[in-house]
Amino acid sequence: MRRLAALAAALALGAGCASSRPELPPRRGHLAALQLPPVAEAPYAPAVGALEGRVVLVAFVATWCLPCIAQLPTLDSLQKELGPQGLRTVAVGMDLDGEQVLAPFAEYYALPYPLVVASEPLRTGESPYGRVTSLPTFFLLDRRGEPLGAWEGIAGQEQLERAVRKALKTQ
């Protein structure tokens, strides 16, 4: 019985670690869906005007998600290095407690990009991003706001960096 419980726990933890590619949603309006107030001071706002013409990396995360926390150094590094070239990262907090838990999280980790509270349409899958079923989930948007790629689970820094650099060069 203990082995079964240990196996179930290992499988549950591993579910967030497998990097896979979800289907890219065909709908438009990806940038508009991010127009939510950041929970803490941020170097830029997730308003459409601040994101248009930029390559945008959207990260769906939660404060209780260990793979999400493990991915923060990669996101920080990418934003700091590639921000001057046109990358904008926006984290979308999926926590049901919203700003109450996300604001201290953003402050503690000193995120160099905005963290917004997921709206109800983002949580329920009624947004251009579709239903987010795994955390973390990442979407890479081109300079027109159209999806270029999507990843579920922990994505390697090299994998994300390669995709972002390609998007920055080809746009």
Image (cartoon, helix red, strand yellow):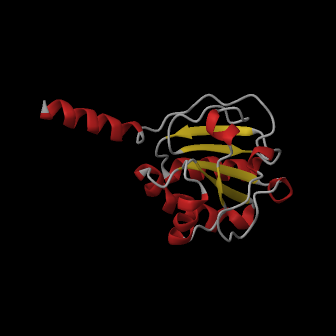
Residue 105 screen position, x and y as percent: 52, 64
Q: Quadrant of residue 121?
A: top right
Residue drawn at point x = 18 percent, y = 30 percent: 4
Give the tally of numbered discs. Answer: 0
Closer to the camera, 77 or 45?
45
Closer to the camera, 69 or 56?
69
Residue 59 screen position, x and y as percent: 60, 49
Q: Quadrant of residue 127?
A: top right
Residue 27 screen position, x and y as percent: 77, 30
Q: Is residue 110 above or below residue 96?
A: below
Residue drawn at point x = 58 percent, y = 67 percent: 111
Residue drawn at point x = 69 percent, y = 30 percent: 25
Q: Quadrant of residue 90?
A: bottom right
Residue at the extreme right: 49
Q: Is residue 101 above or below residue 22?
A: below
Residue 130 screen position, x and y as percent: 66, 32
Q: Is residue 5 left or right of residue 104?
A: left
Q: Is residue 55 left or right of residue 60?
A: right
Closer to the camera, 120 or 129?
120
Q: Is residue 67 left or right of residue 114?
A: left
Closer to the camera, 9 or 16?
9
Which quarter shows the N terminus? top left
